[in-house]
Image (cartoon, helix red, strand yellow):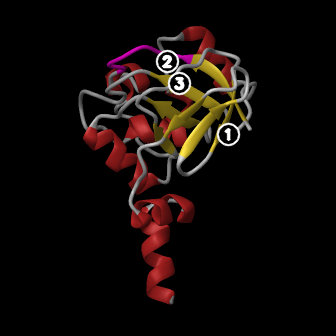
């Protein structure tokens, strides 16, 4: 079970996730420090490790819109957050698969900050309200990439096999 630690509305841009002024910092080991840098309270909780890995960031539609910056994904992956949204911007979703960030598209999700979610392959159950919501599934290859930790580990694993 995963707890929703923050809720955003529609159209959260990559600039809100990883502000452009930090683009000189691109190493995945460094980008997590700037996740939602302009959301001071949330960023402080992340950097102080007050938010457990596997916690859920909940959003509306079109999460990750804007530029194609990979750092918007790597900064979230560094905190091992799970992103649940009504929908994702196409490039953000593919970058998430490539870097192994778990994203779950749930078009009809209704939940609030503090709710507990049970995340399944086909549905999400809001344990707080008891409601169930259908998940838009990823392909089996995309799921395997995320399980492997991203495109590079997935490819290495397949080459070895």
In magenta, the rendered stretch is 7-12
User: What is the secondary structure assignment of the residue under circle 1?
Assistant: loop
What label sits on residue 156 in the rendered view?
A: none
- Per the model, the C-alpha gap separating discs 2 and 1 is 20 Å
Residue plotted at (29% across, 34% down): 89
Counting from the top left corner in percent of width and height, residue 154 is at: 47, 71
Report if residue 40 is visible in the image: yes
Q: Which mark is residue 54?
A: 1
Q: Nearer the viewer, residue 26 or 139?
A: 139
Q: Closer to the camera: disc 3 or disc 2?
A: 3
User: 61 above or below 133?
Assistant: above
Query: Residue 93's x, y, as percent?
Result: 35, 43
| Mark 3 → mark 2, Cα distance in angstroms | 17 Å
**Marks 2 and 1 in Cβ contact (< 8 Å):** no
Q: Nearer the viewer, mark 2 or mark 1?
A: 1
**In this rendering, position of residue 124 left or right of residue 127:** left
Of the numbered discs in the image, which one, if any, rests on residue 37? 2
The residue that appears at 54% across and 16% down in the rendered structure is 7
Say which residue appears at 49% left-offset and 18% top-offset.
37
Residue extending furthest bottom?
Answer: 161
Q: Secondary structure at mark 3?
A: strand
Q: Quadrant of residue 69?
A: top left
Q: Is residue 111 above or below residue 123?
A: above
Few, some or many C-alpha atoms within 10 Å of disc 3 (few <14, some 14-19, many ≥20)? Answer: many
* Residue marked by disc 3: 58
Of label 2 and label 1, which has the lower sequence position?
A: 2
């Amino acid at each position: 079970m995963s707890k929703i630690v923050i809720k955003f509305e529609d159209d959260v841009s990559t600039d809100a996730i990883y502000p452009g002024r930090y683009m000189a910092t691109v190493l995945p080991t460094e980008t997590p420090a700037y996740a939602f840098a302009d959301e001071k309270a949330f960023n402080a909780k992340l950097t102080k490790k007050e938010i457990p890995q596997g916690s859920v960031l909940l959003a509306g539609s079109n999460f990750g819109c804007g530029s194609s910056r990979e750092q918007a994904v790597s900064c979230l992956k560094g905190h091992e957050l799970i992103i649940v949204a009504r929908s994702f911007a196409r490039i953000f979703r593919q970058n998430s698969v490539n870097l192994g960030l778990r994203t779950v598209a749930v078009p009809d999700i209704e939940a609030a900050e503090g709710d507990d979610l049970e995340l399944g392959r086909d549905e999400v159950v809001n344990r707080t309200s008891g409601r169930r919501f259908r998940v838009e599934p990823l392909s089996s290859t995309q799921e395997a990439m995320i399980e492997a930790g991203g495109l590079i580990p997935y490819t290495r694993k397949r080459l070895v096999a």
